Image (cartoon, rainbow, N blue to C red):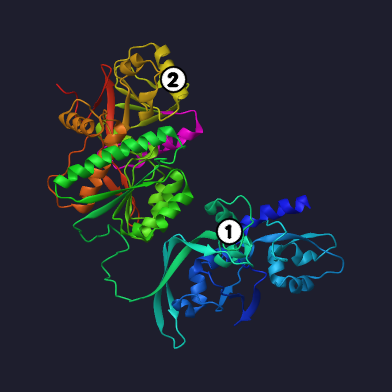
Amino acid sequence: MNKLVIVLLLCLPFFASAQPGVTSVVDKNGKKYYEHTVEEGNTLWGLQRIYGVSVEEIVAENPDLKEGLKVDQKVYIPVTKESISKIPTSDYKVRKGETLYGLSRKFGTTVDQLITLNPELKDAGLAKGQIIKIPYQEKGKEPTIEITRPVEELPTSPNPFVVDTVVNEDGSEDQVSFQFSDSTINHLVMSHETLYKVSKRFMVSVEEIMRINGLTSTSIKEGQILVIPVKQERVERLEIKPVPTERDPETGPLTFEPKEKYKVALLLPFYLDGGGNSRVQQLATQFYMGAKLAVDSLEKRGLIADLVIYDTKNDSAHIQSILADTNFLTTDLVIGPFYQDHIATLSVYCLDNRIRMVCPVATSEDHLKSNRLLYEAVPNPNVSMTLLAQHMLKNNAQDHIVLVKPELESDIEMYNAFRDAFQSSPVEGVRPKLVETSASSFTGNIRSGVKTLLVIPTNDQKTAIRFMNSLGRWGKRSKGIYVFGTKEWVNFSDINNMYKNKYNFSYASSNFVDYYTDVTINLNKMHRGYYKTDLSRMAIHGYDVLNYFTSEFFFPELENKPTLVMDGFNMQQVGPADGYRNSHVFVIQQEEYELFDTEKGHDD
């Protein structure tokens, strides 16, 4: 008995409504459909979750839904292999003499559905004692069998509303939007109701109702008030307007109407509820501090923008809840997020809803493909190596260039990016020779009396240390030798700074800050005045990113553009239908124990 109770409690959270298998399966025009009878509290959103079929598909099969759901209304939901594979199931032990047809009648399903859930039955048939999957069947008042595929795995709509074309009986078409928004209702428990029946009525899991109401058991009583989370839906008939053909061309930049006031959304992992990575939290806060200074500065130039802050944490579900708020659709520019796993979700949403998005961290260029609204503000390491190779082709054609292959597989992409760009990028005159060598034999390729550029693309500290030690043991004169690593080497304190200085350590980067320039000093003063603390690199990054992109997007004709402090931007479209990457590069070199931009040279 105790085991039965435990199984019951484990199962309860996964039930939200009448399940496929209990609902009748009917044939219409040669296709199979679940015939769902609408109960009070049912929503299209809930039907999507229960049957594993999208709102769009349900609406397409039921044109009368343009008026919304009504109690006792019949809704026909297509039965597909995908939807069958996602429905909750339980294990069933086959008894002697049972057939597939008999089981389909017994459990209110079809033979095809049983075979879809159990592909092995197609050829082998049934055997006594065999364990098979069957659609969940409610027995009595409460379920007592274990769910093996929870309802929570069913798809949810990525957008806060769905627009579909509904065909009327006369052949005409209506454009209808089904808009969903989060809300709650207070439900008065009736004498005959159990928590399971309440969850079934409102299509909300028992677990969710218990969490929101602080319940420690499934026991409820008559007259009790339960707070129920629901998806309120509004059905509206849309007026179909012709779209100008020039509004959204298939390639090239898009145009946007100017506004008097813009809305900029900042989606960063602040972890305001506590927990999370403290270092990431600190960087997000610093980025926001710089962005806020930029908004205030831009206002003085006539650009009015509301900076709306969203805490993404490191939670994909939380980001989906942010995007489900219809107010987010009024956003003009999204900046963020930091975490790579969230970039795809947010960039797809922005593309679907025509919102420009700036990614403030380096990311994969895969996200830029077929998304003209995505801008990568910081080149990824491979792009930096590509830009460094192009820089050397232009500025070091007469020098001896040696590419050292790194030891780690994780660095090989950077190595290949440099080599491929060096060998294929356009060049004036004769293409200089690129010598390729290994970390164990590179010293044999150093030429005496000739300026030699040693390029070793690695972000690994141990590899960098071994390389510099090998160069130091080589022991010959260092004059004319330039070592090109990556920006990460700046933080490799275990490499003797004397070696970095001796061999003119250099690297390519999209940003470089000189704390002694007037513009940096003035920004630091402003930062201290606002926050009573000194300026950080991440705050400067937030300041530059917001300054540059808002002025470029919203004030493209502005002649007196804001002065950037640290970042350089040269946004180039990857392909005619793709997004934009930052193709600006500073080549930074260490000399006399100080870093400087080689393009500008030393300050006198």
Image-based side of 339 in relation to 189, left or right: left
- Would you identify the image quadrant in which residue 8 lies? bottom right
- The amino acid marked with disc number 2 is Ile
Tell me if mark 2 has few (under 14), some (14-19) or many (20+) residues whose alpha carbon lies within 10 angstroms of its own. Answer: some
The answer to whether residue 389 shows anywhere in this view is no
Whether residue 218 is visible to the viewer of this picture, yes or no, is: yes
Task: Pinpoint residue 287: horizontal percent, then vertical percent.
Answer: 31, 38
Please give the name of the residue rendered at 27% of the width and 42% of the height, measured from the top-left corner: 545
At 46% from the left edge and 21% from the top edge, which residue is drawn?
441
Q: Is mark 1 on a helix, strand or loop?
A: loop
Labelled disc at residue 465: 2
- Residue occupied by mark 1: 205
Which of the 4 quarters of the picture holds residue 324?
bottom left
Nearest the viewer among 288 and 518 is 288
Q: In this view, does 369 lie above or below 19?
A: above
Mark 2 or mark 1, whichever is nearer to me: 1
* Residue 407 is one of the magenta-drawn residues: yes
Residue, far left: 559
In the depicted view, which residue is nearer to us: 416 or 302? 302
Q: Residue furthest right?
A: 96
Q: Which amino acid does label 1 sit on?
A: Ser
Tell me where residue 348 appears, x and y as whole percent: 41, 56
The residue positioned farthest toward the bottom in the image shown: 170
